[in-house]
Protein backbone atom coordinates (compact mmCIF):
# COMPACT_ATOMS: atom_id res chain seq x y z
CA UNK A 1 0.00 0.00 0.00
CA UNK A 2 2.69 2.51 0.95
CA UNK A 3 4.92 1.45 -1.93
CA UNK A 4 2.25 2.14 -4.51
CA UNK A 5 1.85 5.56 -2.97
CA UNK A 6 5.48 6.47 -3.70
CA UNK A 7 5.36 5.07 -7.21
CA UNK A 8 2.40 7.26 -7.99
CA UNK A 9 4.67 10.27 -7.65
CA UNK A 10 6.96 8.94 -10.35
CA UNK A 11 4.22 7.83 -12.69
CA UNK A 12 2.37 11.11 -12.68
CA UNK A 13 2.25 11.39 -16.44
CA UNK A 14 1.95 7.66 -16.99
CA UNK A 15 -1.17 5.63 -16.51
CA UNK A 16 -2.85 5.45 -13.13
CA UNK A 17 -4.84 2.36 -13.95
CA UNK A 18 -4.10 -0.24 -16.55
CA UNK A 19 -5.67 -3.53 -17.58
CA UNK A 20 -3.68 -5.99 -19.63
CA UNK A 21 -5.48 -8.84 -21.30
CA UNK A 22 -7.87 -9.18 -18.37
CA UNK A 23 -10.36 -12.01 -18.27
CA UNK A 24 -12.95 -12.77 -15.68
CA UNK A 25 -14.55 -16.16 -15.38
CA UNK A 26 -16.70 -16.62 -12.28
CA UNK A 27 -16.58 -19.90 -10.35
CA UNK A 28 -19.96 -20.85 -11.82
CA UNK A 29 -18.47 -20.65 -15.34
CA UNK A 30 -19.91 -17.29 -16.35
CA UNK A 31 -17.40 -15.46 -18.52
CA UNK A 32 -17.94 -11.79 -17.71
CA UNK A 33 -14.89 -10.18 -19.32
CA UNK A 34 -12.74 -11.26 -22.22
CA UNK A 35 -9.31 -9.81 -23.18
CA UNK A 36 -9.84 -6.32 -21.84
CA UNK A 37 -7.07 -3.78 -22.28
CA UNK A 38 -7.31 -0.34 -20.77
CA UNK A 39 -5.02 2.52 -19.98
CA UNK A 40 -6.28 5.36 -17.83
CA UNK A 41 -4.16 8.47 -17.32
CA UNK A 42 -4.53 11.48 -15.09
CA UNK A 43 -6.75 14.05 -16.72
CA UNK A 44 -8.64 11.42 -18.65
CA UNK A 45 -12.31 10.74 -18.18
CA UNK A 46 -13.22 7.44 -19.78
CA UNK A 47 -16.81 6.29 -20.03
CA UNK A 48 -17.83 2.73 -20.76
CA UNK A 49 -21.18 1.93 -22.33
CA UNK A 50 -22.43 -1.55 -23.03
CA UNK A 51 -25.46 -3.81 -22.85
CA UNK A 52 -26.74 -4.90 -19.46
CA UNK A 53 -24.87 -7.83 -17.98
CA UNK A 54 -21.80 -7.45 -20.19
CA UNK A 55 -19.41 -7.01 -17.29
CA UNK A 56 -19.19 -3.26 -16.69
CA UNK A 57 -19.58 -3.49 -12.91
CA UNK A 58 -17.16 -6.39 -12.91
CA UNK A 59 -14.65 -4.13 -14.65
CA UNK A 60 -14.82 -1.59 -11.81
CA UNK A 61 -14.80 -4.28 -9.14
CA UNK A 62 -11.59 -5.65 -10.62
CA UNK A 63 -10.09 -2.15 -10.91
CA UNK A 64 -10.73 -1.53 -7.21
CA UNK A 65 -9.48 -4.97 -6.16
CA UNK A 66 -12.87 -6.08 -4.85
CA UNK A 67 -12.57 -8.93 -7.35
CA UNK A 68 -9.45 -10.68 -8.64
CA UNK A 69 -9.35 -11.38 -12.38
CA UNK A 70 -8.99 -15.00 -13.42
CA UNK A 71 -6.42 -13.99 -16.01
CA UNK A 72 -4.36 -10.91 -16.91
CA UNK A 73 -2.70 -8.04 -15.11
CA UNK A 74 -4.22 -5.03 -13.38
CA UNK A 75 -2.01 -2.21 -12.19
CA UNK A 76 -3.33 0.56 -10.00
CA UNK A 77 -0.74 3.24 -9.27
CA UNK A 78 -2.49 4.85 -6.32
CA UNK A 79 -4.35 3.85 -3.20
CA UNK A 80 -6.53 6.93 -3.30
CA UNK A 81 -9.46 5.59 -5.24
CA UNK A 82 -12.99 6.91 -5.11
CA UNK A 83 -15.81 4.52 -5.87
CA UNK A 84 -19.37 5.69 -6.33
CA UNK A 85 -21.69 2.70 -6.34
CA UNK A 86 -24.89 2.39 -8.30
CA UNK A 87 -26.84 3.20 -5.13
CA UNK A 88 -25.74 5.68 -2.52
CA UNK A 89 -24.88 3.09 0.21
CA UNK A 90 -25.19 5.67 2.98
CA UNK A 91 -25.35 4.29 6.51
CA UNK A 92 -28.97 4.99 7.49
CA UNK A 93 -28.12 5.74 11.14
CA UNK A 94 -25.60 8.43 10.29
CA UNK A 95 -26.36 12.02 9.34
CA UNK A 96 -25.09 13.41 6.05
CA UNK A 97 -22.09 14.89 7.81
CA UNK A 98 -21.17 11.67 9.62
CA UNK A 99 -21.67 9.67 6.43
CA UNK A 100 -19.38 11.96 4.49
CA UNK A 101 -16.81 11.73 7.29
CA UNK A 102 -16.84 7.95 7.27
CA UNK A 103 -13.95 7.21 4.94
CA UNK A 104 -11.58 9.63 6.66
CA UNK A 105 -12.71 8.12 9.95
CA UNK A 106 -11.81 4.65 8.71
CA UNK A 107 -8.39 5.96 7.80
CA UNK A 108 -7.95 7.18 11.35
CA UNK A 109 -7.92 10.90 10.68
CA UNK A 110 -8.31 13.33 13.55
CA UNK A 111 -11.81 14.53 14.29
CA UNK A 112 -11.39 18.19 13.37
CA UNK A 113 -9.44 17.38 10.20
CA UNK A 114 -12.12 15.05 8.88
CA UNK A 115 -14.91 17.42 9.91
CA UNK A 116 -13.28 20.17 7.90
CA UNK A 117 -12.79 17.90 4.89
CA UNK A 118 -16.42 16.74 5.09
CA UNK A 119 -17.75 20.28 5.27
CA UNK A 120 -15.71 21.24 2.24
CA UNK A 121 -17.02 18.43 0.05
CA UNK A 122 -20.57 18.86 1.35
CA UNK A 123 -20.44 22.46 0.19
CA UNK A 124 -18.88 21.37 -3.06
CA UNK A 125 -21.79 19.07 -3.97
CA UNK A 126 -24.33 21.64 -2.80
CA UNK A 127 -25.64 19.87 0.29
CA UNK A 128 -25.01 22.75 2.71
CA UNK A 129 -27.85 23.00 5.17
CA UNK A 130 -28.51 19.25 5.08
CA UNK A 131 -25.52 18.19 7.20
CA UNK A 132 -27.68 16.96 10.05
CA UNK A 133 -30.28 15.17 7.96
CA UNK A 134 -30.50 11.40 7.96
CA UNK A 135 -30.39 9.61 4.58
CA UNK A 136 -34.13 8.85 4.77
CA UNK A 137 -34.79 12.59 4.91
CA UNK A 138 -32.92 13.19 1.67
CA UNK A 139 -34.16 12.76 -1.88
CA UNK A 140 -32.54 10.20 -4.17
CA UNK A 141 -30.47 12.83 -5.92
CA UNK A 142 -29.30 14.32 -2.63
CA UNK A 143 -28.29 10.88 -1.40
CA UNK A 144 -26.25 10.38 -4.54
CA UNK A 145 -24.58 13.72 -3.95
CA UNK A 146 -23.79 12.78 -0.35
CA UNK A 147 -22.24 9.59 -1.69
CA UNK A 148 -20.22 11.67 -4.14
CA UNK A 149 -19.09 13.99 -1.34
CA UNK A 150 -18.04 10.99 0.73
CA UNK A 151 -15.76 9.71 -2.05
CA UNK A 152 -14.35 13.18 -2.55
CA UNK A 153 -13.04 13.45 1.01
CA UNK A 154 -10.31 11.01 0.03
CA UNK A 155 -9.23 13.38 -2.76
CA UNK A 156 -9.06 10.41 -5.10
CA UNK A 157 -6.60 10.11 -7.94
CA UNK A 158 -8.69 7.47 -9.64
CA UNK A 159 -12.45 7.89 -9.52
CA UNK A 160 -14.73 4.98 -10.42
CA UNK A 161 -18.43 5.54 -11.05
CA UNK A 162 -20.82 2.64 -11.53
CA UNK A 163 -23.96 4.05 -13.17
CA UNK A 164 -24.30 6.50 -10.31
CA UNK A 165 -27.16 8.50 -11.81
CA UNK A 166 -29.05 5.73 -13.56
CA UNK A 167 -32.00 5.92 -11.20
CA UNK A 168 -32.43 9.69 -11.37
CA UNK A 169 -34.63 11.89 -13.51
CA UNK A 170 -33.21 13.68 -16.54
CA UNK A 171 -32.89 17.13 -14.92
CA UNK A 172 -31.19 15.90 -11.75
CA UNK A 173 -28.93 13.71 -13.79
CA UNK A 174 -27.84 16.62 -15.98
CA UNK A 175 -27.21 18.77 -12.95
CA UNK A 176 -25.09 16.06 -11.32
CA UNK A 177 -23.23 15.54 -14.59
CA UNK A 178 -22.26 19.20 -14.49
CA UNK A 179 -21.13 18.76 -10.92
CA UNK A 180 -18.97 15.78 -11.83
CA UNK A 181 -17.45 17.76 -14.68
CA UNK A 182 -16.72 20.70 -12.42
CA UNK A 183 -15.06 18.40 -9.88
CA UNK A 184 -13.09 16.79 -12.66
CA UNK A 185 -11.75 20.15 -13.86
CA UNK A 186 -10.98 21.19 -10.30
CA UNK A 187 -9.45 18.01 -8.92
CA UNK A 188 -7.83 16.53 -12.04
CA UNK A 189 -8.48 12.91 -11.19
CA UNK A 190 -8.65 10.06 -13.65
CA UNK A 191 -12.27 9.05 -14.14
CA UNK A 192 -13.77 5.73 -15.19
CA UNK A 193 -17.51 6.07 -15.58
CA UNK A 194 -20.12 3.44 -16.40
CA UNK A 195 -23.45 4.43 -17.88
CA UNK A 196 -26.31 3.28 -20.05
CA UNK A 197 -26.91 6.70 -21.46
CA UNK A 198 -24.91 7.48 -24.57
CA UNK A 199 -25.43 11.23 -24.36
CA UNK A 200 -24.28 11.22 -20.75
CA UNK A 201 -21.19 9.28 -21.87
CA UNK A 202 -20.33 11.72 -24.63
CA UNK A 203 -21.02 14.79 -22.51
CA UNK A 204 -18.85 13.69 -19.59
CA UNK A 205 -15.85 12.06 -21.11
CA UNK A 206 -12.66 12.53 -23.03
CA UNK A 207 -13.00 9.01 -24.38
CA UNK A 208 -15.98 6.67 -24.80
CA UNK A 209 -15.55 2.90 -24.93
CA UNK A 210 -18.22 0.57 -26.23
CA UNK A 211 -18.42 -2.94 -24.85
CA UNK A 212 -19.96 -5.96 -26.50
CA UNK A 213 -22.47 -8.29 -24.88
CA UNK A 214 -21.25 -11.06 -22.60
CA UNK A 215 -18.45 -12.03 -22.56
CA UNK A 216 -17.74 -8.31 -22.50
CA UNK A 217 -14.89 -6.93 -24.50
CA UNK A 218 -14.06 -3.49 -25.88
CA UNK A 219 -15.31 -3.25 -29.45
CA UNK A 220 -15.10 0.45 -30.24
CA UNK A 221 -13.49 3.58 -28.91
CA UNK A 222 -14.27 7.25 -29.58
CA UNK A 223 -12.22 10.31 -28.70
CA UNK A 224 -14.45 13.18 -27.61
CA UNK A 225 -13.06 16.36 -29.14
CA UNK A 226 -14.92 19.01 -27.07
CA UNK A 227 -12.94 21.28 -24.70
CA UNK A 228 -12.68 20.45 -21.07
CA UNK A 229 -14.24 22.78 -18.81
CA UNK A 230 -17.18 21.62 -20.91
CA UNK A 231 -19.83 24.06 -21.99
CA UNK A 232 -23.31 22.68 -21.22
CA UNK A 233 -24.46 24.14 -24.52
CA UNK A 234 -22.24 21.69 -26.37
CA UNK A 235 -25.05 19.17 -26.00
CA UNK A 236 -27.13 21.10 -28.50
CA UNK A 237 -24.52 21.27 -31.25
CA UNK A 238 -24.69 19.12 -34.40
CA UNK A 239 -21.20 17.72 -33.69
CA UNK A 240 -22.40 16.41 -30.35
CA UNK A 241 -25.47 14.82 -31.91
CA UNK A 242 -23.35 13.24 -34.59
CA UNK A 243 -20.97 11.65 -32.07
CA UNK A 244 -23.89 10.40 -29.98
CA UNK A 245 -25.25 8.85 -33.16
CA UNK A 246 -21.99 7.10 -33.95
CA UNK A 247 -21.63 5.70 -30.43
CA UNK A 248 -25.25 4.55 -30.40
CA UNK A 249 -24.70 2.84 -33.70
CA UNK A 250 -21.61 1.02 -32.41
CA UNK A 251 -23.54 0.04 -29.31
CA UNK A 252 -26.36 -1.43 -31.36
CA UNK A 253 -23.88 -3.45 -33.40
CA UNK A 254 -22.28 -4.74 -30.20
CA UNK A 255 -25.50 -6.28 -28.91
CA UNK B 1 -21.00 28.30 -8.96
CA UNK B 2 -23.55 25.58 -9.39
CA UNK B 3 -24.79 25.98 -5.83
CA UNK B 4 -27.89 28.04 -6.49
CA UNK B 5 -29.93 25.46 -8.42
CA UNK B 6 -28.81 22.73 -6.05
CA UNK B 7 -29.70 24.53 -2.84
CA UNK B 8 -33.20 25.35 -4.01
CA UNK B 9 -33.92 21.81 -5.14
CA UNK B 10 -33.33 20.21 -1.72
CA UNK B 11 -35.75 22.57 0.01
CA UNK B 12 -38.62 21.27 -2.06
CA UNK B 13 -37.54 17.66 -2.17
CA UNK B 14 -37.13 17.51 1.60
CA UNK B 15 -40.76 18.37 2.18
CA UNK B 16 -42.41 15.04 1.39
CA UNK B 17 -40.09 13.31 3.84
CA UNK B 18 -41.42 15.28 6.78
CA UNK B 19 -45.00 15.33 5.56
CA UNK B 20 -45.15 11.57 5.15
CA UNK B 21 -44.24 11.19 8.81
CA UNK B 22 -47.68 12.48 9.74
CA UNK B 23 -50.98 10.73 9.08
CA UNK B 24 -51.82 9.69 5.55
CA UNK B 25 -51.52 12.53 3.07
CA UNK B 26 -54.75 13.96 1.70
CA UNK B 27 -54.99 15.07 -1.90
CA UNK B 28 -56.98 18.34 -1.81
CA UNK B 29 -54.89 21.03 -0.16
CA UNK B 30 -57.94 23.04 0.91
CA UNK B 31 -59.31 20.39 3.25
CA UNK B 32 -55.93 19.92 4.92
CA UNK B 33 -56.57 21.97 8.11
CA UNK B 34 -59.65 20.00 9.21
CA UNK B 35 -58.87 16.54 7.95
CA UNK B 36 -55.70 15.67 9.87
CA UNK B 37 -57.30 16.20 13.30
CA UNK B 38 -60.30 14.04 12.44
CA UNK B 39 -57.95 11.43 11.01
CA UNK B 40 -55.92 11.53 14.21
CA UNK B 41 -59.03 11.00 16.36
CA UNK B 42 -60.09 8.22 14.02
CA UNK B 43 -56.74 6.48 14.15
CA UNK B 44 -56.66 6.68 17.96
CA UNK B 45 -60.09 5.07 18.02
CA UNK B 46 -58.81 2.44 15.57
CA UNK B 47 -55.80 1.56 17.74
CA UNK B 48 -57.58 1.41 21.10
CA UNK B 49 -61.15 0.58 20.14
CA UNK B 50 -60.88 -3.01 18.93
CA UNK B 51 -58.69 -4.38 21.75
CA UNK B 52 -60.89 -2.63 24.34
CA UNK B 53 -63.95 -4.12 22.68
CA UNK B 54 -62.45 -7.60 22.99
CA UNK B 55 -61.61 -6.91 26.64
CA UNK B 56 -65.24 -5.94 27.27
CA UNK B 57 -66.41 -9.15 25.58
CA UNK B 58 -64.09 -11.29 27.69
CA UNK B 59 -65.20 -9.59 30.92
CA UNK B 60 -68.85 -10.02 29.96
CA UNK B 61 -68.25 -13.68 29.13
CA UNK B 62 -66.52 -14.14 32.50
CA UNK B 63 -69.57 -12.72 34.32
CA UNK B 64 -71.95 -14.92 32.35
CA UNK B 65 -69.83 -18.03 32.96
CA UNK B 66 -69.49 -17.11 36.63
CA UNK B 67 -73.25 -16.82 37.00
CA UNK B 68 -73.89 -19.99 35.01
CA UNK B 69 -71.47 -22.03 37.12
CA UNK B 70 -73.62 -21.44 40.21
CA UNK B 71 -72.11 -23.14 43.27
CA UNK B 72 -69.02 -24.13 41.24
CA UNK B 73 -68.35 -20.44 40.48
CA UNK B 74 -64.91 -20.71 42.11
CA UNK B 75 -63.78 -22.16 38.75
CA UNK B 76 -64.17 -18.71 37.25
CA UNK B 77 -64.56 -15.95 39.85
CA UNK B 78 -66.31 -12.71 39.04
CA UNK B 79 -63.89 -10.11 37.57
CA UNK B 80 -64.63 -7.48 40.23
CA UNK B 81 -63.86 -10.00 43.00
CA UNK B 82 -60.51 -10.76 41.36
CA UNK B 83 -59.67 -7.08 41.03
CA UNK B 84 -60.60 -6.48 44.66
CA UNK B 85 -57.82 -8.88 45.72
CA UNK B 86 -55.28 -6.44 44.29
CA UNK B 87 -56.29 -3.92 46.99
CA UNK B 88 -57.36 -6.28 49.76
CA UNK B 89 -54.94 -5.55 52.66
CA UNK B 90 -54.61 -9.26 53.52
CA UNK B 91 -53.43 -10.36 50.06
CA UNK B 92 -52.30 -7.24 48.18
CA UNK B 93 -48.95 -6.64 49.98
CA UNK B 94 -47.89 -10.27 49.30
CA UNK B 95 -48.84 -9.93 45.69
CA UNK B 96 -47.05 -6.64 45.03
CA UNK B 97 -43.88 -7.84 46.83
CA UNK B 98 -44.00 -11.00 44.74
CA UNK B 99 -44.50 -8.99 41.57
CA UNK B 100 -41.44 -6.90 42.39
CA UNK B 101 -39.47 -10.07 43.07
CA UNK B 102 -40.53 -11.55 39.73
CA UNK B 103 -39.55 -8.31 38.00
CA UNK B 104 -36.07 -8.46 39.53
CA UNK B 105 -35.61 -12.13 38.57
CA UNK B 106 -36.79 -11.65 35.00
CA UNK B 107 -34.80 -8.46 34.40
CA UNK B 108 -31.66 -10.12 35.78
CA UNK B 109 -32.24 -13.15 33.58
CA UNK B 110 -32.97 -10.91 30.60
CA UNK B 111 -29.78 -8.88 31.09
CA UNK B 112 -27.72 -12.06 31.20
CA UNK B 113 -29.53 -13.49 28.17
CA UNK B 114 -28.87 -10.28 26.21
CA UNK B 115 -25.17 -10.30 27.11
CA UNK B 116 -24.70 -13.98 26.30
CA UNK B 117 -26.94 -13.90 23.23
CA UNK B 118 -25.26 -10.90 21.60
CA UNK B 119 -21.78 -12.28 22.32
CA UNK B 120 -22.75 -15.69 20.99
CA UNK B 121 -24.08 -14.16 17.78
CA UNK B 122 -20.99 -11.99 17.34
CA UNK B 123 -18.77 -15.06 17.67
CA UNK B 124 -20.88 -16.98 15.15
CA UNK B 125 -20.72 -14.02 12.80
CA UNK B 126 -16.93 -14.15 12.61
CA UNK B 127 -16.61 -17.18 10.38
CA UNK B 128 -18.94 -19.53 8.59
CA UNK B 129 -17.56 -22.58 10.37
CA UNK B 130 -18.11 -21.07 13.82
CA UNK B 131 -21.69 -20.41 12.87
CA UNK B 132 -22.02 -24.00 11.70
CA UNK B 133 -20.43 -25.25 14.92
CA UNK B 134 -22.47 -23.11 17.32
CA UNK B 135 -25.87 -22.52 15.80
CA UNK B 136 -27.21 -26.06 16.35
CA UNK B 137 -26.70 -25.57 20.07
CA UNK B 138 -28.71 -22.39 20.05
CA UNK B 139 -31.52 -24.28 18.35
CA UNK B 140 -31.16 -27.15 20.80
CA UNK B 141 -31.41 -24.71 23.69
CA UNK B 142 -34.66 -23.51 22.21
CA UNK B 143 -35.95 -27.06 21.80
CA UNK B 144 -35.28 -28.17 25.39
CA UNK B 145 -38.57 -28.61 27.22
CA UNK B 146 -37.85 -26.38 30.18
CA UNK B 147 -39.95 -28.43 32.58
CA UNK B 148 -37.80 -31.47 31.82
CA UNK B 149 -34.65 -29.82 33.06
CA UNK B 150 -35.94 -27.72 35.96
CA UNK B 151 -35.13 -30.53 38.45
CA UNK B 152 -31.56 -30.51 37.16
CA UNK B 153 -31.30 -26.75 37.46
CA UNK B 154 -32.52 -26.88 41.05
CA UNK B 155 -30.07 -29.65 41.74
CA UNK B 156 -27.12 -27.66 40.34
CA UNK B 157 -27.92 -24.09 41.35
CA UNK B 158 -29.91 -24.48 44.56
CA UNK B 159 -33.62 -23.85 44.85
CA UNK B 160 -33.68 -20.06 45.08
CA UNK B 161 -32.76 -16.87 43.18
CA UNK B 162 -29.89 -18.26 41.08
CA UNK B 163 -31.87 -21.24 39.83
CA UNK B 164 -34.82 -18.98 38.94
CA UNK B 165 -32.55 -16.70 36.96
CA UNK B 166 -31.03 -19.67 35.13
CA UNK B 167 -34.48 -20.77 33.97
CA UNK B 168 -35.08 -17.23 32.70
CA UNK B 169 -31.82 -17.16 30.79
CA UNK B 170 -32.45 -20.51 29.11
CA UNK B 171 -35.91 -19.45 27.97
CA UNK B 172 -34.93 -15.94 26.86
CA UNK B 173 -31.63 -16.72 25.14
CA UNK B 174 -32.64 -18.03 21.73
CA UNK B 175 -34.41 -14.95 20.34
CA UNK B 176 -31.39 -12.85 21.31
CA UNK B 177 -28.98 -15.19 19.54
CA UNK B 178 -31.00 -15.59 16.37
CA UNK B 179 -32.11 -11.97 16.08
CA UNK B 180 -28.64 -10.57 16.65
CA UNK B 181 -27.13 -12.98 14.14
CA UNK B 182 -29.79 -12.08 11.61
CA UNK B 183 -29.13 -8.38 12.22
CA UNK B 184 -25.38 -8.69 11.85
CA UNK B 185 -25.80 -10.57 8.60
CA UNK B 186 -28.42 -8.22 7.21
CA UNK B 187 -25.79 -5.66 6.18
CA UNK B 188 -25.98 -4.92 2.46
CA UNK B 189 -23.11 -6.11 0.33
CA UNK B 190 -22.45 -2.62 -0.99
CA UNK B 191 -21.88 -1.28 2.52
CA UNK B 192 -19.52 -4.12 3.34
CA UNK B 193 -17.57 -3.36 0.20
CA UNK B 194 -17.42 0.31 1.12
CA UNK B 195 -15.58 -0.70 4.29
CA UNK B 196 -13.53 -3.32 2.49
CA UNK B 197 -12.30 -0.72 0.00
CA UNK B 198 -10.86 1.30 2.87
CA UNK B 199 -9.12 -1.77 4.25
CA UNK B 200 -11.20 -1.66 7.45
CA UNK B 201 -10.41 -4.38 9.99
CA UNK B 202 -12.87 -7.03 11.14
CA UNK B 203 -13.30 -5.17 14.44
CA UNK B 204 -14.01 -1.86 12.74
CA UNK B 205 -16.59 -3.45 10.48
CA UNK B 206 -18.25 -4.95 13.55
CA UNK B 207 -18.28 -1.71 15.54
CA UNK B 208 -19.11 0.80 12.86
CA UNK B 209 -21.21 -1.25 10.48
CA UNK B 210 -22.57 -4.59 11.66
CA UNK B 211 -23.56 -3.74 15.22
CA UNK B 212 -25.33 -0.48 14.34
CA UNK B 213 -27.09 -2.22 11.47
CA UNK B 214 -28.12 -5.03 13.81
CA UNK B 215 -29.62 -2.72 16.44
CA UNK B 216 -33.22 -2.89 15.15
CA UNK B 217 -33.09 -6.68 15.13
CA UNK B 218 -31.40 -6.72 18.54
CA UNK B 219 -34.13 -4.54 20.04
CA UNK B 220 -36.83 -6.64 18.43
CA UNK B 221 -35.16 -9.70 19.97
CA UNK B 222 -35.04 -7.97 23.35
CA UNK B 223 -38.74 -7.34 23.24
CA UNK B 224 -39.47 -11.00 22.57
CA UNK B 225 -36.95 -12.17 25.15
CA UNK B 226 -38.35 -9.76 27.73
CA UNK B 227 -41.75 -11.41 27.54
CA UNK B 228 -40.16 -14.85 27.69
CA UNK B 229 -38.03 -13.93 30.69
CA UNK B 230 -41.18 -13.15 32.68
CA UNK B 231 -42.44 -16.61 31.77
CA UNK B 232 -39.08 -18.03 32.85
CA UNK B 233 -39.15 -16.22 36.18
CA UNK B 234 -42.63 -17.52 36.95
CA UNK B 235 -41.76 -21.09 35.97
CA UNK B 236 -38.61 -20.83 38.11
CA UNK B 237 -40.52 -19.51 41.11
CA UNK B 238 -43.17 -22.15 40.69
CA UNK B 239 -40.59 -24.88 41.23
CA UNK B 240 -37.92 -23.23 43.36
CA UNK B 241 -39.61 -22.23 46.58
CA UNK B 242 -36.66 -21.09 48.66
CA UNK B 243 -36.13 -17.36 49.24
CA UNK B 244 -38.60 -14.52 48.76
CA UNK B 245 -41.74 -15.75 47.00
CA UNK B 246 -42.40 -14.41 43.52
CA UNK B 247 -45.64 -14.50 41.49
CA UNK B 248 -44.91 -18.09 40.48
CA UNK B 249 -44.60 -19.08 44.15
CA UNK B 250 -47.96 -17.43 44.89
CA UNK B 251 -49.63 -19.10 41.93
CA UNK B 252 -48.36 -22.44 43.19
CA UNK B 253 -49.57 -21.72 46.74
CA UNK B 254 -53.00 -20.35 45.78
CA UNK B 255 -53.74 -23.18 43.39
CA UNK B 256 -52.79 -25.77 46.02
CA UNK B 257 -55.21 -24.12 48.46
CA UNK B 258 -57.91 -23.58 45.85
CA UNK B 259 -57.96 -19.83 46.53
CA UNK B 260 -59.39 -19.07 43.12
CA UNK B 261 -59.84 -15.29 43.43
CA UNK B 262 -56.25 -14.86 44.64
CA UNK B 263 -55.04 -17.26 41.95
CA UNK B 264 -56.73 -15.27 39.19
CA UNK B 265 -55.45 -12.02 40.68
CA UNK B 266 -51.84 -13.22 40.68
CA UNK B 267 -52.17 -14.57 37.12
CA UNK B 268 -53.51 -11.16 36.12
CA UNK B 269 -50.56 -9.39 37.75
CA UNK B 270 -48.15 -11.78 36.00
CA UNK B 271 -49.74 -11.02 32.62
CA UNK B 272 -49.67 -7.28 33.25
CA UNK B 273 -46.01 -7.56 34.15
CA UNK B 274 -45.30 -9.35 30.88
CA UNK B 275 -47.18 -6.71 28.91
CA UNK B 276 -45.46 -3.84 30.76
CA UNK B 277 -42.00 -5.26 30.08
CA UNK B 278 -42.89 -5.90 26.43
CA UNK B 279 -44.13 -2.33 26.03
CA UNK B 280 -41.09 -0.93 27.81
CA UNK B 281 -38.69 -2.66 25.44
CA UNK B 282 -40.78 -1.63 22.46
CA UNK B 283 -40.50 1.97 23.65
CA UNK B 284 -36.77 1.58 24.26
CA UNK B 285 -36.25 0.16 20.77
CA UNK B 286 -38.18 3.01 19.24
CA UNK B 287 -36.10 5.52 21.17
CA UNK B 288 -32.85 3.86 20.19
CA UNK B 289 -33.38 3.33 16.47
CA UNK B 290 -36.75 4.94 15.66
CA UNK B 291 -35.01 7.92 14.05
CA UNK B 292 -33.67 5.88 11.17
CA UNK B 293 -35.68 2.66 11.31
CA UNK B 294 -39.42 2.08 11.46
CA UNK B 295 -39.39 0.09 14.66
CA UNK B 296 -42.81 -1.56 14.91
N1 LIG C 1 -20.29 -13.19 -8.28
C1 LIG C 1 -20.71 -13.61 -9.50
N2 LIG C 1 -20.82 -14.91 -9.77
C2 LIG C 1 -21.23 -15.33 -10.99
N3 LIG C 1 -21.57 -14.52 -12.00
C3 LIG C 1 -21.48 -13.20 -11.79
C4 LIG C 1 -21.06 -12.67 -10.53
N4 LIG C 1 -21.07 -11.32 -10.61
C5 LIG C 1 -21.49 -11.03 -11.86
N5 LIG C 1 -21.74 -12.15 -12.57
C6 LIG C 1 -22.16 -12.24 -13.99
O1 LIG C 1 -21.25 -11.53 -14.76
C7 LIG C 1 -21.92 -10.82 -15.79
C8 LIG C 1 -21.54 -9.37 -15.73
O2 LIG C 1 -22.06 -8.78 -14.55
P1 LIG C 1 -21.93 -7.23 -14.26
O3 LIG C 1 -22.56 -6.95 -12.97
O4 LIG C 1 -20.51 -6.83 -14.40
O5 LIG C 1 -22.79 -6.64 -15.45
P2 LIG C 1 -23.04 -5.12 -15.84
O6 LIG C 1 -22.45 -4.90 -17.16
O7 LIG C 1 -22.61 -4.22 -14.75
O8 LIG C 1 -24.62 -5.09 -15.99
P3 LIG C 1 -25.65 -3.92 -15.65
O9 LIG C 1 -25.49 -2.90 -16.71
O10 LIG C 1 -26.96 -4.58 -15.74
O11 LIG C 1 -25.31 -3.41 -14.28
C9 LIG C 1 -23.39 -11.09 -15.60
O12 LIG C 1 -23.79 -12.06 -16.53
C10 LIG C 1 -23.51 -11.62 -14.19
O13 LIG C 1 -24.53 -12.57 -14.13
MG1 LIG D 1 -23.63 -3.08 -13.22
Image: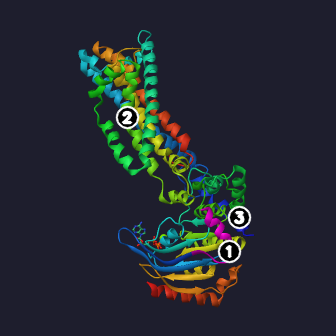
Task: Decide which of B47, A196 is in the foreground and name it.
Answer: A196
Give the Cα separation between the discs numbered 2 and 1.
Answer: 76 Å
Asked whether residue A79 appears in the rendered view, the answer is: no
Residue A246 placed where, x, y %? 55, 89
Quadrant showing the N terminus of chain B? bottom right
Which residue has dot 2 on it?
B54
Residue A124 circle label: 3
Q: How many marks?
A: 3
Colouring of the image: rainbow
Q: Which residues are magenta?
A: A1-17
Badge 3 crowding class, 10 Å Cα cut-off, few under 14, some 14 to 19, many 20 or more, is many
Q: Do the numbered discs 1 and 3 sit on residues whose CB atoms are within 8 Å?
A: no
Mark pair 1, 3: CA separation: 25 Å
Tell which subunit mark 2 falls on. B
Determine whether B172 is above or below B42 in the image: above
Examine the rendered structure and indicate whether residue A151 appears above or below residue A226.
above
In the rendering, at what x and y percent does residue B92 appear? 43, 14
Residue A82: % across, % down: 60, 65
| Relative side of B163 to A250, left or right | left
Disc 1: which residue:
A12
Q: What is the crowding at mark 1: few (fewer than 14 residues within 10 Å), some, or many (at least 20)?
A: few
Amino acid sequence: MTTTDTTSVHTRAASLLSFEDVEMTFPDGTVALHSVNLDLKRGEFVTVVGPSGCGKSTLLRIASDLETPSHGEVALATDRIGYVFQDATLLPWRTTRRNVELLAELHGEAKDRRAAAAQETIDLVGLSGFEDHLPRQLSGGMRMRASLARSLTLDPEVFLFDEPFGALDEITRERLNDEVLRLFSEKKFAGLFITHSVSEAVYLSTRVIVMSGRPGTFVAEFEVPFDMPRDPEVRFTPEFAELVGEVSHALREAH
Amino acid sequence: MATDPTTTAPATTAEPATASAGPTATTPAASAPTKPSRKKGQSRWLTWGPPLGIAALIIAAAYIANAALGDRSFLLPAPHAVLAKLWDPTTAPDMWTAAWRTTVVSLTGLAIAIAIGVTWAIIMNQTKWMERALFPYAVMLQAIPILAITPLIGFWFGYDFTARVVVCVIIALFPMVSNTLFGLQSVERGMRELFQLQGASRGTVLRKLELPAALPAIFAGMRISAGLSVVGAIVGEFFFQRGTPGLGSLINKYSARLLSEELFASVLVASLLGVAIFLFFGWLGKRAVGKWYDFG
